Image (cartoon, rainbow, N blue to C red):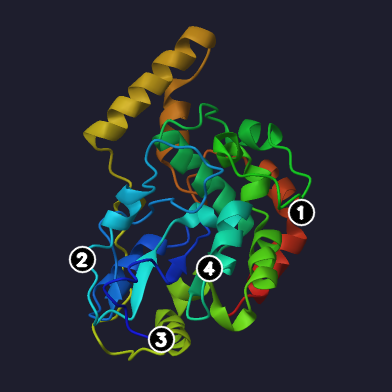
Amino acid sequence: MTRITRTDRRPNLFLIGAPKTATTSLAAALGRREDVYVPHVKEPNNYNADLSVHWARRGAHFLNLYEGAESGHRYLLDASTLYLYSPVARRSIAAMGGDTKVVIGVRDPVDLLVSWHSHLLRENIERRLSVEEAWEASSWDGDIERPFDYDQMRNYKRIVDLSNAVGAYIDSIRPRRCFIYNMESLITQPRLVQQALCAFLHIDEDEGFSLTNENQSQKRTVNLASAMRLAATIKAYVRIEKNFGILKGVQALFSAPGKGSTVSSPFLQNVACELSNEQEWVSSCAS
């Protein structure tokens, strides 16, 4: 494995999602190693030029993130999870050298739907408090070459279409450069996923590498920023819908899928039936 040189400070390891598949924990675990450089901005979104967002780090701002990389680093990490859906990012990464590696996480599409919707609500990107309404408003024809712009972040039917998104990367990048892990396996068998990932990267397993939950957004406590976003969201909806239930809004914004979720079981069951092939594909993904 080639070491990084002073003139080659661009990422050669990509953790491209899917979103909400413990990529924050995985990036933090890799960052504790001496041979992997993880910048302080986990998701710079440099290579997905089709997505125009104010938080993207591009050009010189992107390159500056890797100024601290040294010759001892085997890998420089870019963990922008939305690269998974961007044809622009996929083509850019595919054109990189043979040492470039891609790590992709997948999870049950129904769980991903609810988790991603909750995430967009917290970030004030989504205004539909009902995940059912948000799902029904989505439309997806399977065209993976369609640019992934800001509106596509709310296209839940595209977000959960993991088999096509991952398949496009495998077709564009040689399979030996791709590592796919199932989030369920990461939770239930973290050691096995860890061993497989280390083997894929050709790095020692016991060099400060362990998987723990680093993502503070997983916590179900309401901080001040979240409360302010919640208040703003409720205020907007109260003006539109007089009969809108505030308690329902709070639950929708902060509840996790599963037990205690405000999402109706019939709706989830219908979505699960609609996504049965996708669920089967995700289940078949073993690290």
Residue sitting at x 47%, y 28%: 248
Q: Nearer the viewer, mark 3 or mark 1?
A: 3
Looking at marks 4 and 1 on the same chain, the residue that comes earlier in the sequence is marked by 4
Depth check, mark 2 against mark 3: the one in front is: 2
Task: Specify which label sits upstream in the sequence, 4 or 3.
Answer: 4
Residue placed at 41% from the left, 79% from the top?
190
Neighbor class of circle 2 (other Cα within 10 Å; few <14, some 14-19, many 20+) is few
Q: Which amino acid type is shown beneath numbered disc 4?
A: Ile
Which residue carries the number 2 mark?
A: 68
| Location of residue 157 in the rendering, given as x and y in whole percent from the top left corner | 68, 45
3 or 1: tag closer to the N-terminus: 3
User: Which residue is tagged 4?
Assistant: 104
Mark 1 vs 2, N-terminal side: 2
Q: Residues within 10 Å of mark 1 (few under 14, many from 20)?
A: few
Amino acid under disc 3: Cys
What's the residue type where badge 1 is placed?
Cys
> In the structure shown, which secondary structural element does the residue marked by tag 3 occupy?
helix
> 10 Å neighbourhood of mark 4: few (<14), some, or many (≥20)?
many
- State which mark lies toward you, 2 or 4: 2
Depth check: 287 or 170 in front? 170
Confirm whether residue 120 shows in the render: yes
Q: Nearer the viewer, residue 119 or 46?
A: 46
Task: Say what amino acid the circle numbered 2 marks.
Answer: Gly
Query: Label 1, on which residue?
Result: 273
Name the foreground residue: 212 vs 150: 150
